[in-house]
Image (cartoon, coloured by chain):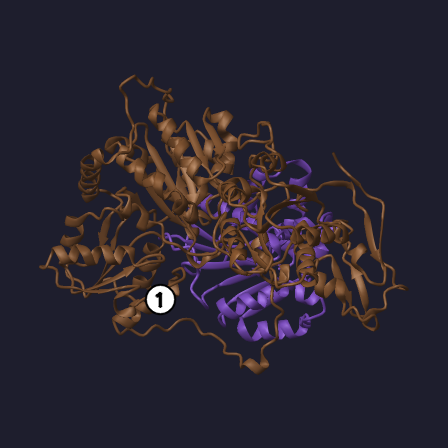
Chain colours: A brown, B purple
Amino acid sequence: MEWMITANEPGKTYLMQGNEAISRGALEAGIRFAAAYPGSPSSEILTMLGHVAEEMDIYAEWSTNETCALEACLGASFARVRSLCIMKQNGLLTVGDALHSASLSGIRGGLVLIVADDPSAHSSTNEFDSRHQARSAALPMLEPANMQEAKDMVKWGFELSEQLQQLVMVRTTTRINHGRSSVVLGEFPGQKTDPATIGEWDRMVAINWFKDGQNAKIDQAQDIFEDSPFNQYMGPDSADLIIVTCGTGWLYSTEAVETLELQDSVGILKIGTTYPLPEKFIVQHLAKTKKVLVVEEVDPFLEQNIAILMAYHPELQVELLGRRGGNAMPRKDELNPDIVRNSLAALVNKEYTGPDIAVIPPEEAVVLPPRELTFCAGCPHRASFFLLKQTLRIQEGQGVVMGDIGCYTMGGQRAGHYLYNFLCCMGGGISAAEGLGQLTRFGFEQPVLALAGDSTFFHSCLPGLVNAKYHNSDMLFVVLDNAATAMTGFQPHPGIGLTAMGRAAEPISIEKVVEAIGCPVTVADPFDIDGTTQIVYDLLKQPGLKVLILKQECATLVRKSEKPRVWVDQDLCRGDECGCGRFCSRIWGCPGNIWDYEAGKAKIDEVVCVGCGVCVSLCPAGAIKMEGGQADE
Amino acid sequence: MNKELVKDPLNIIICGVGGQGNILATELLASALVEQGFYTTVGETYGASQRGGSVMSHVRISSTAEYGVLIPLGEADIIVSFEPTDTLRVARDYANKGTLIITESRPNYPLAVLSGEAVYPAMEDIEAELKKLAGVVKIIEATRLAVEAGNSQATNILLMGALTALPQVPLTTEDYDRVMEQRFKETALELNRKVFKIGYEQM
């Protein structure tokens, strides 16, 4: 909550979400600048900073993509302004060049980069581990183990960043970002730093000349980490086994040791500074044991860096276990208290007897209907996917559809009639379609389509579109323009006309951008199923690059003062006799279209229905009716 | 820390379907616990819940130490659920024979049921299996009671009233009321106080 992150109450304890704690830590560090691109589980941070920007006298923006965000922070840092950059794991991979280059040039004002990973891919297409990037770019990295550390590490990260003149990464995971715990508030700085003048001979330049400096900085970070209070050992002086852990693994490990009553024989070495490792500190503690279990989220990053360290220290004679070593932990998915406790119990041959749990034989268990994800009632994507599928069925030759990232990623599942064949990353669809579209010269005859949302269009489709245009690929690019970054919580993007700080901005028209590149562009309404099906059919017959913008506002944004009433005329609905196979509730699949078991006929759930009226045009019996309604301005 | 818990850590799960207000209810509960000086952690699993998915919050309360945000399987002491099939789904993973369950009886039909492809199980069958899995099962018509009191959206606070009435939960109505005062204004505060009391009296 915003009042918590701005409350001037040092010493007061509040229950805070990890993302709130991070925002608070940045404000306590006196940031003046924050930039991000939305991505779960990190999106709340910049949303909150944007809302409190005026009050706290800072600048906050939703950048067009993560590279823009990081480079904007580099600019602010050049003028010695403290800057916070936020993204999710995929975003970090797209900024690789900027990240590695910035590490060579170094920074001026403190720059902390928050990267939020999503183990088990709760809200992602993957669970990439961002920590490899810190190692690859030679950047110091911190990993908070709870919400208090999330705040404190961000705050300290700025001091470290200025001390080293280097960017500092803070890696979180979903359970930190979206978890809540007690956080003791600290003080705000008395005075904010104003931008410094950049002199004629000031330089922040990324060339290999500075590699010696880069190496010196990471060595200095290692020295500082040797004495960091974020690293600590708890346990006996001589241990049967030592758990080395970071992030969420720490509290799962302390619970496992407590539950199994192993306090006298198992130690826990908690590492908060996971790159570069505090070598002397680790070697000193690992000398206490012969067996090490590494507990960490996603990849065996900590584990394998310890393996490297062991190669340099032959005096350490330990068996190294973890997500790789000894297959002691699963190779994928997030940690939980059961995984950690069971792994530990197996390694020390200790039985665990939990609470008394009833075993229900499968044949006696109630059959539960699954909770499936779908597009919201009235979502324009449902109409777009339906009409594209329909067109491809009518069309000669099996169409190939390249998907992209957003709510419409669900279009590859049942919600979108399993429409697309290809899914890679943000902006990946259009460029892959460009390549496929070039194969017509070798006799490839299948129609090629690429899909992207409006926020994704600005994020990473522009270079792909220029490439497709310049090389005149045979393909149709469909922009699903719902005027929203819907999946992550409706953050504004350049097409919207609003900034993160709630100020008006001049919206950029996708149509005009496409026209300026020189592509023929058609704008159509996905709710006009028949008309737009014809348009897609005709476009697919034309050679070269075509762009179609399917424009209809996200259903959760449309506010209607008087919602149109949609209902099923029970005399006209023929039920199962119709031959449509319950088209409206089964095939169309809008949550507003339901089946009335008693009547054996279709029905509208008037609480859920938003009155888009598309099903009215689709019912073969003309049984769905609509009246009234007026859209708000 | 001057307060002892009947069990430490005390593990509570609050679950339901996206949009039912369980994240707010959990946040209020946990804030009240932090104000009382308990170590309290909350883990929320929601993914794409805005689009009809299940939402589950784990609350872990201790007077001695901070615990990780997830409750081990079979170790929920109390489950408060806003939807019957979700109650059963969560109870199968997290309940033991001593678990106390408070559940709403009103179904929130998933897509497969609305489309006629799957059948929603009978409440008696759900209740029978819950009774095999857990120690105590208390069914409350929370939505109906909240609608009668003024607004179905207050169902979440009504169930928090029922939870607070349990002797295991180290909170009084006044503790919860202080947090509600911080979050709600005027008519919303009045309504939430009213339904909280109704929920409390159900136990």
Q: How many marks?
A: 1
Q: Residue at x 53, y 79 (%)?
A: A360
Q: Position of residue A371 (x, y in %)?
A: 60, 63
Q: Tell me if mark 1 has few (under 14), some (14-19) or many (20+) residues whose alpha carbon lies within 10 angstroms of its own.
A: some
Instruction: Please tell me which residue lies in front, B172 or B18.
Output: B18
Q: Position of residue A324 (x, y in %)?
A: 28, 65
Q: Position of residue A437 (x, y in %)?
A: 54, 53
Query: Can the viewer see residue B38 in this picture?
Result: no
Query: Can the viewer see residue B120 in this picture?
Result: yes
Which quadrant holds the C terminus of chain A?
top right
Query: Badge 1 sits on which subunit?
Result: A
Residue at the right extreme of this rendering: A571
Q: Quadrant of residue A417?
A: bottom right
Element type at mark 1: loop
Residue at the left extreme of this rendering: A315
Instruction: Please tell me which residue lies in front, A484 or A617.
Output: A617
Q: Position of residue A549 (x, y in %)?
A: 65, 44
Instruction: Please tell me which residue lies in front, A626 or A279.
Output: A626
Q: Which residue is mark 1?
A: A330
- Residue A61 to residue B93: above or below: above
Q: Quadrant of residue A28?
A: top left
Amino acid under disc 1: Pro
**In-image side of A213 versus B186 (left or right):** left
Q: Residue at x 63, y 71 (%)?
A: B127
**In-image side of A599 versus A485 (left or right):** right
Instruction: Please tell me which residue lies in front, A44 or A545.
Output: A545
**In-image side of A622 versus A104 (left or right):** right
